[in-house]
Image (tube, grey):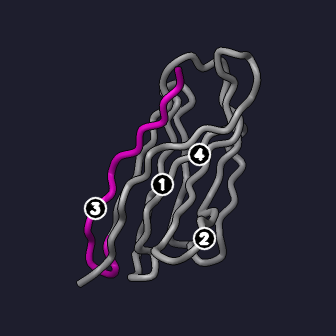
Amino acid sequence: QVQLVESGGGLVQPGGSLRLSCAASGSIFGINVMGWYRQAPGKQRELVAYITSGRNTDYADSVKGRFTISRDNAKNTVYLQMNSLKPEDTAVYYCNADLQDYTHRYRDYWGQGTQVTVSS
């Protein structure tokens, strides 16, 4: 009924940039918070950044000043602009959305993940 599809991952050299996108589709009646998480091998999934429907944002300390989250409410899409990438940013990045689906309840949805690898 609802899908979150990420795109934009890949291999980039240290200091480079990538832009991730996540589009939500299906029976959606409203979207509250949208966010990006990441999980590196052998580590727990961690919050990278989130943005509210009013466009308030917050970031993990490790990415402040380098990453920017934004959203297009008309397209049900959230973006993550990642600059000055470091090898430690290597992880699978997951999109998350707290959205009102066909049940008319707000529920948590996740994308399938996109790999970001920072390496020379």
Three-letter code, disc 4: Asn
The residue where tag 3 is placed is 10
Magenta span:
1-16
For the point 53% across and 59% down, the residue is 68
Residue 101: image quadrant is top right
Disc 2 is placed on an element classified as loop
Three-letter code, disc 1: Leu
Q: Nearer the viewer, mark 4 or mark 1?
A: 4
Q: Nearer the viewer, mark 2 or mark 4?
A: 2
Dot 2 or dot 3: first in sequence order is 3
For the point 41% across and 69% down, the residue is 83
Asked whether, in this view, residue 79 is left or right of residue 8, the answer is right
Asked whether, in this view, residue 113 is left or right of residue 68, the answer is left
Dot 4 or dot 1: first in sequence order is 1
The residue where tag 2 is placed is 44
The residue where tag 4 is placed is 96
Three-letter code, disc 3: Gly
Q: Vertical placement of 7 versus 47: above or below?
A: above
Dot 2 or dot 1: first in sequence order is 2
The local crowd at label 4, few if under 14, some if 14 to 19, many if 20 or more residues have their Cα within 10 Å, is many
Q: CA distance from mark 2 to mark 1?
A: 20 Å
Q: CA distance from mark 2 to mark 3?
A: 21 Å
The local crowd at label 1, few if under 14, some if 14 to 19, many if 20 or more residues have their Cα within 10 Å, is many
Queried whether the magenta region covers residue 95, the answer comes back as no
Q: Nearer the viewer, mark 3 or mark 1?
A: 3
Q: Position of residue 23 (x, y in %)?
A: 45, 35
The residue where tag 1 is placed is 80
Q: Vertical placement of 49 versus 23: above or below?
A: below
For the point 43% across and 69% down, the residue is 91
Residue 36: image quadrant is bottom right
